């Protein structure tokens, strides 16, 4: 089962603190959306608003076209995978997964059959009689997922579901989550502060900061052409080059590039992988290598450009290049699309 | 092995203290329970006559029955009254007022315990607040006898243990992740179902521990039944004190004390067994 | 309607909890000679009466002496034992712990009775000292348990670091262990003092001429209801509440 979600002008305040400010968002049925942002940005509050654990101060939430803003969690077509999983420690996995169906009044035979199917889906059918404390962290995560999916929700909400796992397991679980979502077709809304996780998993990323949506779009679009300086920085490392917008375009220490932004002080963002020794639209010119380190897929180098000796640029060079400190390289940067923002 | 020797050096004082002032007296008490009194003279021996007397004399085994009845009533009532109170403080009172609400709920816990029983006597006496209120409301014409009854003893005990249990159950509820309740409600459970299937099983170990503590403190208490219950029916501690005071019958008092300990041990075993069965 | 039920229950329970304390304090200001309605007053005559009573003030001081003395012994022994058991590998450690905790599971009456028998056998006179010994016996397990529970790995690493930097065993104890455990030690001491201050049965069995406050109040009680008892009870309650509030502010706040 699946349904679209519409968030209409949702604002939420805790006392004087505005946790969410005029959030508007449409999520298509069957879409996998991640809410990405630093802690305290409001992403978990937004998830709680969707799940019915927090009633927003203003605005409406529609799921499948129906207004659910004032409905309690039990009466919404949503279920949540909690950050600490909240598996009931006194119940077997089978009873945990079957809990929602039991509450809906299903008899034991039917709910056990569904629960087994769900445990099968997450690869834990063999452990149906175990208790949560006998499982590893990754297994508990899967049980929480199975329990939330067992009641056939239209929308599944995941609150930092992989946060408690170590890095390797987290990467493996990302792939699994994505594949399960493809199988069941349910709309997934997944909160995380890990941009790599967001990129690995989401159809669409919503970048949040200080209670507002900074940017939303496909991972590739937000990576290449973020709408705000915050989104640019949060999605990954970037070189920030001070610049000034004038009549001819954006004046940088390395020359002028065409830009139709507002006039005044600005900052040009260049991803480390956009800076290199190959051809590029913006000629940075000679730069002295301060240090360089081999990273497998690339060589990461700090360089001081001669045209702007105050700056230190980070560049990801081809893994075959490993320049000595002090060497001078001629650099250029790809500027398509050009990422620059005015600075007040 | 100098490490071990230094370790013994640290433990020794407490160990010697416990051996000298707890284990030794306990052993002597055990021996005493097997001694007999010949008139006023103590005769050491291995006699079971004190225990036999317990079975024979009605006022002795009556005391065991009374103690058990009172203690079980008090334990059950206290848990039943304290759980909702702890629940309301933990889940209904806003976060910022909770500490204060809890502090207020257990503040009278710190009244001196002789004074607390006395205060109940005051409230329940013939001219006391409760009787005056009943008469004032026209519910009764004549004052009702409330003090010097089992009801008074139970009231005094329940008052004390409700505060103790509210504290322990509150702590228990608060240490549960709020996500357990959220998860249950999210999956369609109503408030009653959430309580029955999730919160109650998760807090049961804490409740059993608290109930055991109540049992131990209640069954061994002398003051509350002595002040509030009067002398119409005696509990085991009261009978022990009677043996000590009026008759200086230390052998019988010791035997009664060991019976008291046996009751506590039985309660402990019952609690432990229940927990194990229910837990895993 | 159903929303009001929890609040009604809360109010009802608070009423039950405060009924005796309220009556106690209210009628301590009674002007007449009976601490029952109707209330006549307010009057401070019973407070003046109580504070002028030498037996009571002596009992109050005795209680303080016994509480502080027995708690100091219990906490010192409890701390040393906790340190020994937490930091050294001792054969039979589990048994030792169980033995040290054991008095906690036994009714005070039984502890007092056992001690009374032994003390009478060896012909020692009953006094504040014997009552203090009794209180230290019942408070030692508590002090040990509280302090032992807070001796975590963090402290152990700090102690290792101190030794690594050249501190001797005594210096480690004095400069690292005790300061780091100060909250637990203070909490144990405070709890110990309040329990001893309030304890009746052991003090009743193990004292004779000099008695502690609960025992003195007990003997006053035999002559029936009196506003004097209300006054002294209110004073004791006030002292206890002040101690609780003080501990809350000094010990438990600082830990966070």
Image (tube, grey):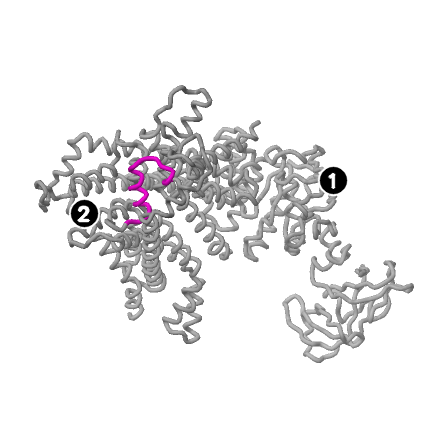
The residue under the point 70% across, 80% down is A326
The residue under the point 60% across, 49% down is A160
- For the residue pair A39 and B163, the one nearer the viewer reads as B163
- For the residue pair A307 and B118, the one nearer the viewer reads as B118
Residue under mark 1: which chain is it in? A
From the image, which quarter does the N terminus of chain A lie in? Answer: top right
Residue C92 drawn at (x, y percent) = 27, 58
- For the residue pair A155 and C168, the one nearer the viewer reads as C168
Dot 2 falls on a residue whose secondary structure is helix
Residue under mark 2: which chain is it in? B
Local crowd size for mark 2, using a 10 Å CA cut-off: few (<14), some (14–19), many (≥20): many
Q: Which residue is mark 1?
A: A8
- Label 1 and label 2: CA atoms lie apart by 78 Å
Camera-near label (1 vs 2) is: 2
From the viewer's perspective, tell me whether residue A36 is left or right of residue C27: right
Q: Which residue is mark 2?
A: B29
**Residue C234, labelled with which disc?**
none
Q: Main secondary structure of the magenta part?
A: helix
Farthest right residue? A247
Dot 1 falls on a residue whose secondary structure is strand
Residue B260 drawn at (x, y percent) = 24, 40
Residue A306 drawn at (x, y percent) = 78, 77
From the viewer's perspective, tell me whether residue B43 is left or right of residue A187: left
Local crowd size for mark 1, using a 10 Å CA cut-off: few (<14), some (14–19), many (≥20): some
Q: Is residue B82 magenta?
A: no
Based on the displayed image, in which of its 4 quarters is residue A257 positioned? bottom right
From the image, which quarter does the C terminus of chain A lie in? Answer: bottom right
Residue A239 drawn at (x, y percent) = 74, 66
Q: Is B20 rendered above or below residue B57?
A: below
- Which region is colored magenta? C211-229
| Badge 1 and badge 2 both on one subunit | no
């Amino acid at each position: 089962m699946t349904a679209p979600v519409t968030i209409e002008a949702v604002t939420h305040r805790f006392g004087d603190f505005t946790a969410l400010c005029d959030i508007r968002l449409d999520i298509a049925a069957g879409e996998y959306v991640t809410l990405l942002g630093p802690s305290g940005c409001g992403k978990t509050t937004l998830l709680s608003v969707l799940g019915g654990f927090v009633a927003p101060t203003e605005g409406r939430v529609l799921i499948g076209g129906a207004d659910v803003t004032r409905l309690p969690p039990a009466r919404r077509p949503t279920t949540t995978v909690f950050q600490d999983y909240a598996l009931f420690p006194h119940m077997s996995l089978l009873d945990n997964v079957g809990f929602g169906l039991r509450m809906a009044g299903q008899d034991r035979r039917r709910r056990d059959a569904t629960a087994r199917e769900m445990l099968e889906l997450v690869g834990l059918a063999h452990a149906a009689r175990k208790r949560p404390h006998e499982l590893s962290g990754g297994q508990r995560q899967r049980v929480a997922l199975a329990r939330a999916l067992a009641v056939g929700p239209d929308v599944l909400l995941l609150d930092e579901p992989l946060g408690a796992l170590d890095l390797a397991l987290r990467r493996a679980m990302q792939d699994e989550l994505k594949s399960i979502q493809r199988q069941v077709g349910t709309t997934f809304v997944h909160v995380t502060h890990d941009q790599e996780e967001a990129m690995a998993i989401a159809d669409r990323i919503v970048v949040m900061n200080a209670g507002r949506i900074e940017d939303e779009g496909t991972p590739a679009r937000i990576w290449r052409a973020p709408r705000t300086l915050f989104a640019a920085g949060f999605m990954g490392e970037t070189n920030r080059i001070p610049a000034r917008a004038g009549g001819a375009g954006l004046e940088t220490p390395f020359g002028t590039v065409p830009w139709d932004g507002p006039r005044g002080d600005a900052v040009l963002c260049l991803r480390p992988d956009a800076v290199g020794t190959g051809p590029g639209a913006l000629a940075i010119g000679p730069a002295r290598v301060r240090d360089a380190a081999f990273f497998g897929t690339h060589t990461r180098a700090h360089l001081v450009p001669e045209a702007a000796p105050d700056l230190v640029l980070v560049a990801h060079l081809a893994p075959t290049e490993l320049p000595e400190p002090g060497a001078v390289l001629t650099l250029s940067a790809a500027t398509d699309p050009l990422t620059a923002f005015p600075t007040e | 092995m100098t490490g071990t020797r230094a370790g013994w050096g640290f433990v020794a004082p407490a160990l010697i203290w416990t051996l000298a002032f707890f284990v030794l007296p306990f052993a002597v008490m055990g021996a005493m329970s097997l001694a007999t009194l010949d008139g006023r003279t103590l005769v050491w021996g291995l006699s079971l006559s004190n225990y036999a007397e317990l079975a024979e004399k009605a006022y002795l085994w009556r005391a065991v029955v009374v103690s058990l009845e009172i203690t079980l009533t008090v334990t059950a009532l206290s848990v039943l009254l304290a759980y909702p109170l702890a629940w309301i403080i933990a889940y209904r009172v806003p976060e910022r007022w909770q500490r204060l609400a809890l502090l207020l709920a257990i503040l009278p816990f710190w009244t001196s315990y002789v004074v607390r029983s006395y205060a109940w006597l005051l409230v329940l006496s013939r001219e006391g607040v409760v009787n005056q209120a009943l008469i004032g409301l026209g519910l009764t014409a004549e004052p009702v006898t409330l003090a010097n009854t089992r009801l008074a003893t139970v009231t005094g005990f329940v008052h004390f243990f409700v505060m103790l249990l509210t504290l322990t159950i509150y702590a228990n509820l608060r240490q549960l992740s709020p996500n357990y309740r959220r998860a249950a409600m999210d999956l369609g459970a109503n408030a009653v179902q959430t309580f029955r299937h999730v919160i109650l099983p998760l807090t049961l170990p804490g409740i059993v521990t608290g109930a055991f503590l109540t049992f131990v403190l209640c069954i061994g208490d002398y003051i509350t039944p002595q002040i509030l219950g009067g002398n119409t029916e005696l509990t085991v501690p009261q009978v022990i004190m009677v043996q000590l005071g009026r008759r200086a019958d230390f052998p019988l008092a010791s035997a009664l004390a060991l019976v008291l300990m046996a009751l506590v041990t039985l309660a402990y075993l019952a609690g432990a067994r229940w927990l194990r069965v229910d837990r895993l | 309607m159903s929303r009001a039920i929890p609040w009604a229950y809360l109010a009802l329970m608070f009423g039950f909890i405060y009924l005796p304390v309220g009556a106690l304090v209210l009628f301590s200001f009674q002007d007449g000679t009976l601490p029952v309605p109707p209330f006549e007053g307010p009057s401070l005559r019973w407070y003046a009466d109580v504070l002028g009573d030498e037996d009571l003030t002596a009992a109050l001081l005795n209680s303080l002496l016994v509480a502080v003395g027995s708690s100091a012994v219990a906490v010192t022994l409890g701390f040393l034992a906790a340190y020994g058991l937490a930091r050294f590998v001792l054969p039979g450690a589990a048994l030792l712990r169980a033995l040290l905790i054991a008095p906690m599971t036994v009714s005070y009456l039984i502890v007092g009775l056992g001690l009374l028998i032994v003390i009478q056998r060896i012909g020692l006179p009953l006094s504040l000292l014997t009552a203090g010994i009794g209180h230290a016996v019942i408070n030692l397990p508590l002090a040990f348990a509280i302090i032992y529970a807070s001796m975590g790995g963090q402290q152990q690493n700090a102690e290792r670091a101190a030794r690594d930097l050249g501190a001797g065993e005594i210096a480690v104890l004095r400069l690292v262990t005790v300061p780091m455990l100060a909250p637990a030690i203070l909490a144990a001491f405070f709890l110990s003092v309040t329990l001893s201050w309030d304890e009746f049965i052991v003090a009743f069995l193990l004292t004779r001429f000099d008695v502690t406050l609960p025992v003195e109040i007990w003997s006053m009680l035999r002559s029936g209801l009196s506003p004097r008892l209300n006054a002294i009870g209110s004073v004791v309650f006030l002292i206890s509440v002040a101690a609780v509030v003080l501990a809350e502010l000094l010990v438990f706040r600082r830990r966070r």
